Image (cartoon, helix red, strand yellow):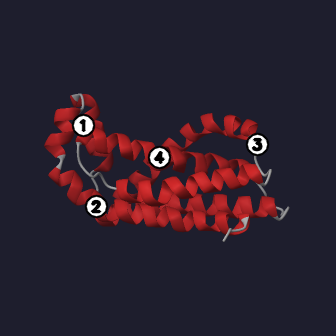
Amino acid sequence: MTLDIQTLIWLFPIMFIFHDFEEIIMMEKWLEKNLTNISGRLPSSIALKVIKQFSMSTAQMTVAVLVIFLFVSSSSFFASQYINQGSFSNIYIFTVIILAFFVHVFTHIGQSILFRSLTPGIVSSIFIVLPYSIIMINSLIINEIITWQIIFICLPFMFLLLPIVIFAHWIGKKTI
């Protein structure tokens, strides 16, 4: 059974939520249990920044994820519009975010190796995000919706998502 490109595009917000539910559920408790592990494995200045950035309650993390979810869902809307030649079409935003989703897998793998533990998001990264993002990117290329040139153009723009994530965390901490 193959899924059409529209279905794959609209599965993106669902895959994002599955992954981020794991992060939401695990983050607060994992951080509490691993403060010394983080401090022991990272230089102190980096450890303090990591701990400060991710020190939030489950409710605060949920708000942060909601903010990011709005960007993910919007990118799916723009990509769907692109496929349908709609008024709000933009494949570049979707490509940037799906590439970041793919690369994000390897940050979880790196964290689990570094901290020698199951970090929040590692299980869904390996079993949901990695397969989905490979299938999505491959389908976009096979269906000639994007090219390798578009991928290479979009790669540097992934770094523009970092301020959005930091802003989302800030909103989460300020609203609850």
Nearer to us: label 3 or label 1: 3
Real-space Cα separation, disc 1 to disc 2, in angstroms: 20 Å
Residue occupying image coordinates x 60% and y 67%: 11
Q: Amino acid at mark 4?
A: His
SS at badge 1: helix
Whether label 3 touches label 1, CB < 8 Å: no
Where residue 118 appears, as percent x and y from the top left, is 27, 52
Nearer to us: label 4 or label 1: 4
Where residue 149 appears, as percent x and y from the top left, is 75, 36
Neighbour class for label 4 at 10 Å: few (<14), some, many (≥20)?
some
**Of marks 3 and 1, which one's residue comes earlier in the chain?**
1
Q: Amino acid at mark 2?
A: Met
Neighbour class for label 1 at 10 Å: few (<14), some, many (≥20)?
some
Real-space Cα separation, disc 3 to disc 4, in angstroms: 21 Å
Whether label 4 touches label 1, CB < 8 Å: no
Residue located beneath label 3 in the image: 147
Q: Quadrant of residue 3?
A: bottom right
Residue located beneath label 4 in the image: 104
**Of marks 3 and 4, which one's residue comes earlier in the chain?**
4
Residue occupying image coordinates x 42% and y 61%: 20
Quadrant placement of the C terminus: bottom left
Neighbour class for label 2 at 10 Å: few (<14), some, many (≥20)?
some
SS at badge 3: loop
